[in-house]
Image (spheres, rainbow, N blue to C red):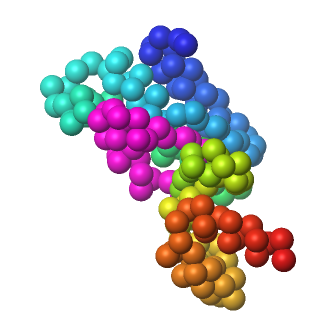
Amino acid sequence: DEPATRHVQVAEMVIEKAKRLVEHKKDVVILLDSITRLARAYNTVVPPSGKILSGGVDSNALHKPKRFFGAARNIEQGGSLTIIGTALIETGSRMDEVIFEEFKGTGNMELVLDRKLADRRTYPAMDINKSGTRKEELLLGDDAIQRLWLLRKVLTPLNSLDAMEWLLDKMKG
């Protein structure tokens, strides 16, 4: 592990390099593990604002991590910048929960992993009912979106293990 100042420095170098590559018509993907740790690092290094959110998060600490995520874009006649980030949840830390809630609605897609499925060696170990893409109707045709909504209607009453096992069984045919 590195000090918080180094985490912040590396994150800022990475995002600036990515922006320059996008300007030169390159497609860039940044995998950030995790937005929670990045926000914690900023919380350590930013000058105190005097306004502390619950969990001990300084209100200024979230500004730059939000700008980091906000840099994701597709530039007309340029490249694209995709940022895939993880977030720590259910750690018992109020700070982690506050950070997660601040970023929860900012992504285009949310994939929720499920430890119970992984422990049972059921893969992909994801909670289908809690995972999804925002504005999926813009990505899929009418027929596909209708089938997806029907599938979600079938899966919603099931717990994550039953939903994944049902889906895997149907995919096997």
Q: Residue at x 50, y 62 (%)?
A: 130
Q: Quadrant of residue 36?
A: top left
Q: How many marks?
A: 0
Along the line of sight, the residue nearer the viewer: 116 or 137: 116
Q: x, y (%) of residue 40? A: 39, 26
- The quarter of the image holding the N terminus is top right
Q: Residue at x 41, y 35 (%)?
A: 91
Q: Is residue 146 above or below residue 44?
A: below
Along the line of sight, the residue nearer the viewer: 18 or 113: 113
- The quarter of the image holding the C terminus is bottom right
Is residue 70 at all visible to an observer of this figure? Answer: yes
Q: x, y (%) of residue 46? A: 32, 21
Q: Is residue 169 above or below residue 91?
A: below
Which residue in the rendered view is the most extreme toward the left?
A: 50
Q: Is residue 53 magenta?
A: no
Q: Residue at x 70, y 53 (%)?
A: 122
Along the line of sight, the residue nearer the viewer: 40 or 66: 40
Q: Provide the residue span drawn in magenta.
A: 84-108
Q: x, y (%) of residue 62? A: 35, 35
Q: Quadrant of residue 47?
A: top left
Q: Is residue 117 above or below residue 7?
A: below
Q: Is residue 61 above or below residue 75?
A: above
Q: Is residue 85 magenta?
A: yes
Which residue in the rendered view is the most extreme toward the right?
A: 173
Is residue 62 at all visible to an observer of this figure? Answer: no
Which residue in the rendered view is the most extreme toward the front?
A: 120
Along the line of sight, the residue nearer the viewer: 116 or 112: 116
Left or right: where 137 falls relative to 122: left
Q: Residue at x 65, y 64 (%)?
A: 164
